[in-house]
Structure formats: C-alpha cells, structure tokens
Amino acid sequence: MTDRTILNASMPNGWRKSSYSNDQGGSCLEVLDGHPTGVPVRDSKSPEGPALVFLSAGWTAFVAAVKVGSLPA
C-alpha cells in the first residue's frame, strides 16, 4: 500500500497556495505538483507537516466539486 502521508512536509520543495488565498493570514491549503504517488496537501500555517497525499483522480474530482458549488457547507 502506498503511504498517504508525508510526516515532515517541509522537506519537498515546490508547494503552492490556492489562487483564492490572500495575505490576511487565514486558513490556506498548499498543494505540491508532480509528486509520484498523488497530490500532497498541507496547512500553510504548519508547513512542517504532516501532509495528506490524495489520489490524483480524487483530488481533481474534489476541486471540480468545489468550483461548481456542489458541496454542502
């Protein structure tokens, strides 16, 4: 089974914040592109980790659902 966490998420380079993030210091997620096992996601306020690694297809479906507003609050 592939590991679905990165315990120390500060080690990989190339994290990026959502384009919806602002400089107000709020809650932001960062993602890492090009990871071999999926899409790592971490809390920007805790860059040392851990990070969760989602399957690429699942992450794509989640982002699409958020964009169209189909997830209940």
Image (cartoon, rainbow, N blue to C red):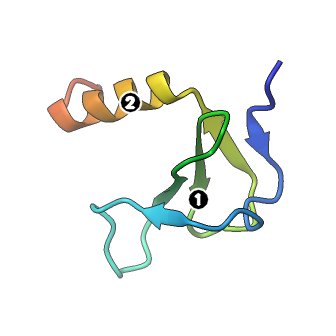
| Image-quadrant location for residue 37 | top right
Which x, y percent locates residue 2?
79, 25
- 31 over 26 or under it: above or below: above
Considering depth in this image, is 67 or 12 the residue closer to the camera?
12
Rounded to the nearest angstrom, the CA distance separating label 1 from label 2 is: 18 Å
Disc 2 residue type?
Thr
Considering depth in this image, is 47 or 36 the residue closer to the camera?
36
Which x, y percent locates residue 27?
46, 63
Q: Quadrant of the N terminus?
A: top right
Considering depth in this image, is 35 or 28 the residue closer to the camera?
35
Query: SS for tag 1?
Result: strand
Disc 1 residue type?
Asp
Q: Residue furthest bottom?
A: 23
What residue appears at the point 43 percent right and 64 percent down from the top-left corner?
17
| Image-quadrant location for residue 21 | bottom left
Which x, y percent locates residue 22?
31, 74
Residue bearing the label numbered 1: 43
What residue appears at the point 47 percent right and 64 percent down from the top-left corner?
16
| Image-quadrant location for residue 35 | top right
What residue appears at the point 59 percent right and 70 percent down from the top-left corner?
45
- 9 over 53 or under it: above or below: below
What residue appears at the point 16 percent right and 31 percent down from the top-left corner?
68
In the rendered view, does 4 fall on the left or right side of 65? right
Query: SS for tag 2?
Result: helix
In the rendered view, does 13 fall on the left or right side of 66? right
Which x, y percent locates residue 3?
81, 31
Disc with the residue nearer the chain's start (1 vs 2): 1
| Closer to viewer: mark 1 or mark 2 | 2
Tag shown at residue 60: 2
Q: Quadrant of the C terminus?
A: top left
